[in-house]
């Protein structure tokens, strides 16, 4: 299976084209399909996550320069910039040979097949990207993740890293009864096996970056970026803009970059499609 990475900086690992001869809407094969339309978000447009941005950029720079780098897990509140930061990293480093392959968690066990496709392309460095990664109890697809990062007899190619985003810090759901099952021995707390498994799974990522809900000042600062002077005719002044932005966030249950973007889409009269990276 060939793929021309000279003309594509990202691809999606997904089901192949329809198999009309068998009357099936999809084949059983999984293939690389080129991304047709890219999100143009830049690093400067990913707001209010400066420390996280610095860490992931530094890790990616090490990766591209041939130094040892860590698999990365970006976890935390929804709408705070996790996915946008990954896309901005790709856009920033693509001229230096960075490429991205997006894979669903159900296909994580295919990483060896993907590795076979990129072993012979040392001129490019690949991020294997899984968005919104999490597992429920009873799922077995997490075994593909453990194998990819450090559990297989075959190591990933030196030009492949795993970057993932998740709303869950430990990737698996946590229940109160698991903490109640912890035991104390000689003043030391020993977690039960289920909780230890959760923490061990996330700990396989050498770089773990937390993303947190915006406070009101950060949220309103982002709203101001979306609404520079002169203000839309919908608002009398900036104080009214802030009041309506707060009401908008309250109605949606919290403040985040995504909510600020949605507020802009709802009230803006700008037809240029300008945006700030917040997903």
Image (cartoon, grey):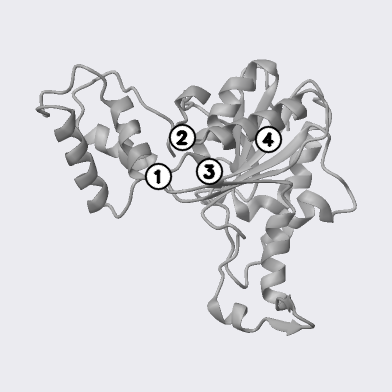
Mark 3–mark 2 Cα distance, whole angstroms, equals 43 Å
Indicate which disc, 3 or 1, sits on the residue closer to the N terminus: 3
Q: Which residue bears the numbered disc 2?
A: 48
Q: Residue at x 40, y 44 (%)?
A: 214
Mark 4–mark 1 Cα distance, whole angstroms, equals 28 Å
Where residue 64 sits, quadrant-wise, is top right
Q: Residue at x 58, y 37 (%)?
A: 52
Q: Nearer the viewer, mark 3 or mark 2?
A: 2
Q: Secondary structure at mark 1?
A: loop
> Is there a contact, CB below 8 Å, between mark 2 and mark 1?
yes
Mark 3–mark 1 Cα distance, whole angstroms, equals 44 Å
Q: Nearer the viewer, mark 4 or mark 3?
A: 4
Q: Residue at x 69, y 17 (%)?
A: 96
The answer to whether any part of residue 42 appears in the image is no
Q: Which residue bears the numbered disc 1?
A: 214
Above or below for 119 versus 74: above
Q: Which residue bears the numbered disc 4?
A: 127
Q: Residue at x 16, y 23 (%)?
A: 232
Crowding at label 2, few (<14), some or many (≥20) Cα neighbours within 10 Å? some
Q: Which of 178 and 120 lies nearest the eye of the viewer?
A: 178
**Which mark is on residue 18?**
3
Mark 2–mark 1 Cα distance, whole angstroms, equals 8 Å
């Amino acid at each position: 299976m060939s793929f021309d990475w000279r003309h594509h900086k990202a691809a999606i690992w997904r089901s192949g084209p329809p198999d009309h001869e068998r009357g099936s809407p999809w084949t059983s094969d999984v293939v690389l399909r080129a991304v047709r339309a890219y999100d143009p978000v830049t690093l400067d447009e990913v707001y209010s996550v400066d420390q996280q941005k610095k860490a992931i950029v530094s890790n990616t720079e090490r990766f591209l320069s041939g130094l040892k780098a860590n698999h990365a897990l970006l976890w935390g509140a929804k709408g705070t910039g996790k996915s946008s930061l990954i896309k901005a990293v790709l856009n920033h480093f693509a001229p230096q040979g960075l490429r991205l392959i997006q894979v669903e968690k159900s296909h994580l066990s295919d990483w060896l097949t993907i590795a076979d496709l990129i072993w012979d392309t040392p001129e490019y460095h690949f991020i294997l990207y899984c968005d919104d990664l999490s597992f429920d109890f009873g799922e077995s697809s997490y075994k593909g993740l453990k194998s990819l990062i450090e559990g297989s007899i075959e190591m990933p190619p030196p030009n492949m890293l795993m970057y993932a985003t998740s709303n869950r810090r430990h990737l698996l759901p946590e229940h109160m009864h698991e903490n109640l099952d912890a035991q104390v021995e000689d003043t030391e707390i020993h977690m039960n096996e289920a909780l230890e498994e959760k923490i061990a799974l996330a700990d396989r990522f050498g770089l773990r970056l937390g993303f947190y809900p915006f406070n009101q000042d950060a949220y309103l600062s982002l709203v101001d970026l979306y609404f520079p002077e002169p203000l839309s005719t919908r608002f009398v002044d900036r104080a009214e803009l802030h009041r309506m932005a707060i009401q908008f966030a309250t109605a949606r249950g919290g403040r985040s970059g995504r909510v600020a973007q949605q507020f802009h889409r709802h009230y803006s009269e700008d037809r240029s499609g300008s945006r700030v990276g917040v997903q």
